Image: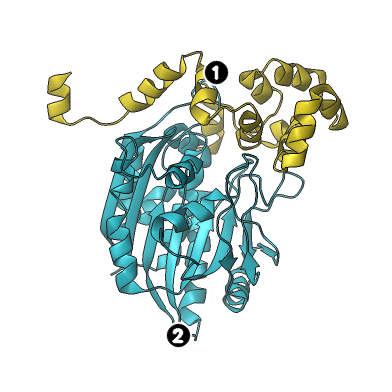
Amino acid sequence: MTQTDRDIPIPGTTLFDGAAAAKGYALNAMCYSFNEAANREKFRADEDAYCTRFGLSAEQRAAIANRDVLGMLAAGGNIYYLAKFAGILGLNVQDVGALQTGMSVDAFKQMLLDQAPRSAAQKQEA
Amino acid sequence: MAEIVGAYFTSHVPAIGGAIHRGDQQTPYWKPFFDGFPKVHEWLAEVKPDVAVVFNNDHGLNFFLDKLPTFAVGAAAEYSNADEGWGLPLYKPFTGHPELSWHIIEQLVGDEFDITTCQEMKVDHALSIPFELAWPDAAAWPVKLVPIHINTVQHPLPSAKRCLAMGRSVHRALASWTGAERIVVIGTGGLSHQLDGKRAGFINPDYDRFCMDHLASDPDALTGHSIREMVRLAGTQGVEILNWIAARGALGECAREIHRNYHIPISNTAAATMLLETA
């Protein structure tokens, strides 16, 4: 079962495994530093210097510079750490969801609502 | 003899903290979620726990990827929240119960769970929000805390079967504790949600219902899926159900459901709240 299970891809999903954790270490370390307000200020003051200090790869620096969430994930970013970076940008998880799915924030929120099981009465109205 | 009064389960989405801070509990968006809590308050007032054993997952406040334990048990005299990166108001500190923590640790290691022990541990929204929801008007938390962390961040994650077995080992520790404490077991997080990737926003009410329907009567049914299958069914962050499964193990063999509330969505999450008592 395990072998087969591992072979079946999950659409739109990448597991944050050892390979990702190794690849993303510098990026996640930088985002972890954002737990401290002083570090968030240092990043805001000079993004480039701050990325250099943490030794981000070219791929990671480009994803940060472009606010490219899927690019950050591809470069080994973990969403729990990236959420701290999103906080600096004033983005919540719906904003981040919209960025990743290519939807507007309103459309993303509607998509969430649409997944709720609806009562027969609600279906009748719709 | 200590008594296990029951188990309380709830989602711990950070946005809930924002809603509490703004006083948004009765707004149309939040009301269906907060409506699940009067029953929780009533129950807690009735069973009066004085210790909480809480299964939760750190989100990059206490642990970084440099050292990430699969299971970690707090054994501190006190625990505090800290800035999680968003500059939000900090949650109240917690008083620990180190003697009970070490008793649980002895049992776990005796049962061959090679856990990490933490005499210092910061706790994040995964722990603070369930407390804010349970005791909204408390000046200080009315229970002492034993926090147990499960890695739900970096794969490989412990299997559901292993988490249930770990929880059952914690139950053996609680059952043999000779103090007079009244213990509530808490499992936090979930239910289905996915924050990352092109499938962000994924929610699965069918799987959530399966989990809620079997939590009391047949928790072993929740261990039939591999972690990868759980990610497929519940979303990348929906695997936080592992905290619920471990907490269910800690409650004891027989349990009955006394309360359930389920609402989609809170933030990106299918939010659920449940109460179980031993049967």
Disc 1 is placed on an element classified as: helix
Could you tell me which quadrant the C terminus of chain B lies in? bottom left
Circle 1 sits on which residue? Answer: A99
Please state if A29 lies on the left or on the right of B22 as rendered: right
Please state if B231 lies on the left or on the right of B76 as rendered: left
Give chain B's shade. Answer: cyan
State which chain is coloured yellow.
A
The amino acid type, in three-letter code, at marker 1 is: Leu
Above/below status of A106 relative to B45: above
Q: Are marks 2 and 1 on the same chain?
A: no
Above/below status of A42 relative to B146: above
The amino acid type, in three-letter code, at marker 2 is: Ala
Name the subunit of mark 1. Answer: A
Disc 2 is placed on an element classified as: loop
Q: Quadrant of residue B264?
A: top left
Q: Residue A55: where, in percent of width, then height?
A: 86, 29
Disc assigned to residue B180: 2
Q: Residue B135: where, in percent of width, then height?
A: 41, 61
Could you tell me which quadrant the N terminus of chain B lies in? bottom left
